[in-house]
Image: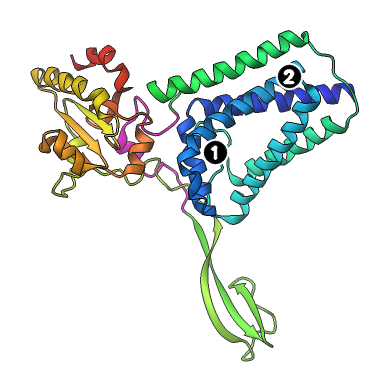
């Protein structure tokens, strides 16, 4: 029993720590996932707090998991983890059975899990936490109370610091399809060997006042003229994986002309500045002007990719502005704005505006 308790304690603790840290690498990604839930439930009142909720949630996961491992406030920690995993299990069940949200984002974009895998993972964690709670055994704390408390506090501060850093400088690990080294056009293609969705036709008939559904492989043995046709529809039998990693990426001029292939086929280096909006333009406009000046001297084109083309037209040269969907920009550029150094469709480098000066060597 003691060995089982220790195994469960370490599994639960380490999984919560890992889950919190992997999402702390990209707290904006978790906030976007929260917005999906808020939209599905009509909770738009909380939209402005999504990022704050994301940061707090990641800190809670890391500190709760570490508290369980080091044995700090053990009884309180395990009860808190029970509440937390109960909440997570509800969310994953909603994802799995409602069909309104594709993934729950439990491990961020770095480790995408299917609805089934995520739900059963949470159920397994729930059972382990219940076992720990009701085992009736006390654990041997590896550290003194003061040391355990210090470890938990330091971990909380580090988790906050990590999130503050990546929100300014971009994630440490880029798990999105727009990461450095990727070719955007290749990422827009259907993966080799991909399998398309498989559907079957389901028929709806009425018999004796009851609606009966069946497909062509399961016709009722007594099917005759007493069956009254009602309708038919397509039912997904097997989900495929034929969706490209990048969808809906398109660049348009101010006049509405699609220039995606023209831009992404340039043989020489060029710069794309992804700026979803211009709320913080005063922080980087002068720097951007200097970069444009240096780039012109080296015959390197610079384009501003934005969802707010009207405001961009007042700030920059109109022939350098490219319109793009806001959701695409939020995925490509976690920091507003983010520079992409490009050659053809390949992302040679990618960096936040706060790191632009140290990356100017890529313009050579």
Q: Is residue 188 magenta?
A: yes
Left or right of residue 71: residue 271: left
Q: Residues within 10 Å of mark 1 (few under 14, many from 20)?
A: many
Identify which residue is drawn at 33% across, 47% down.
248
Left or right of residue 287: residue 43: right
Where is residue 209 drawn, in percent x and y?
A: 67, 86
Q: Which mark is residue 306?
A: none
What secondary structure is marked by label 2? Answer: helix
Q: Nearer the viewer, residue 44 or 217?
A: 44
What secondary structure is marked by label 1? Answer: loop
**Viewer can see residue 82:** yes
Q: Quadrant of residue 68?
A: top right
Q: Residues within 10 Å of mark 2 (few under 14, many from 20)?
A: many
Where is residue 356 drawn, in percent x and y?
A: 27, 18
Q: Is residue 70 magenta?
A: no
Identify which residue is drawn at 14% across, 20% down.
295
What span is colored magenta in the figure?
A: 175-196
Mark nearer the N terminus (2 vs 1): 2
Q: Quadrant of residue 123?
A: top right
Q: CA distance from mark 2 to mark 1?
A: 24 Å
Q: Find disc 1 in the rendering and name its residue.
A: 105
In the image, residue 92 sits, relative to residue 11, either above or below, namely below
Q: Do residues under tags 2 and 1 come within 8 Å of each other at their CB atoms?
A: no
Magenta-colored segment: predominant secondary structure: loop
Q: How many marks?
A: 2
Outermost residue toward the front in this view: 45
**Viewer can see residue 341:** no
Q: Find disc 2 in the rendering and name its residue.
A: 69
Where is residue 194 drawn, in percent x and y?
A: 45, 46
Where is residue 39 drawn, in percent x and y?
A: 49, 51
Left or right of residue 206: residue 341: left
């Amino acid at each position: 029993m003691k060995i089982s308790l220790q195994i469960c304690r370490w599994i639960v603790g380490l999984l919560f720590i890992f889950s919190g840290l992997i999402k702390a690498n990209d707290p904006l990604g978790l906030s976007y996932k929260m917005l999906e839930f808020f939209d599905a439930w009509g909770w738009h009142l909380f939209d402005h707090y999504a990022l704050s909720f994301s940061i707090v949630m990641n800190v809670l996961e890391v500190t709760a998991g570490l508290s369980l491992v080091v044995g700090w406030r053990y009884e309180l920690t395990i009860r808190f983890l029970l509440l937390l995993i109960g909440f997570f299990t509800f969310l994953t069940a909603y994802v799995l059975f409602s069909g309104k949200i594709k993934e729950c984002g439990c491990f961020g974009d770095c480790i995408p899990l299917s609805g089934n895998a995520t739900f059963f993972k949470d159920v397994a964690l729930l059972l382990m936490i219940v076992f720990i709670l009701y085992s009736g055994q006390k654990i041997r704390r590896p550290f003194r109370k003061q040391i355990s408390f210090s470890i938990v506090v330091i971990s909380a501060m580090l988790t906050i610091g990590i999130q503050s850093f990546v929100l300014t400088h971009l994630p440490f690990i880029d798990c999105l399809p727009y990461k450095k080294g990727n070719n955007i056009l290749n990422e827009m293609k259907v993966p080799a060997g991909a399998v398309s969705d498989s559907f079957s036709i389901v028929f709806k008939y009425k018999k004796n006042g009851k609606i009966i559904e069946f497909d062509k492989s399961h016709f009722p043995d007594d099917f005759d003229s007493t069956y009254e046709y009602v309708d038919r529809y397509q039912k997904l039998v097997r989900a495929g994986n034929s969706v490209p990693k990048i969808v809906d990426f398109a660049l348009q001029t101010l006049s509405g002309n699609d220039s995606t292939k023209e831009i992404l086929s340039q043989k020489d280096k060029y710069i794309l500045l992804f700026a979803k909006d211009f709320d913080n333009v005063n922080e980087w406009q002068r720097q951007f002007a200097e970069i444009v000046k240096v780039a012109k001297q080296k015959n390197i084109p610079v384009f501003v990719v934005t969802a707010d083309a009207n405001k961009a037209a007042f700030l920059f040269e109109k022939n350098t502005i490219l319109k793009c969907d806001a959701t695409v920009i939020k995925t490509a550029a976690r920091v507003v704005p983010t520079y992409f150094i490009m050659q053809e469709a390949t992302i040679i480098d990618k960096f936040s505006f706060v790191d632009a000066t140290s990356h100017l060597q890529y313009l050579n």
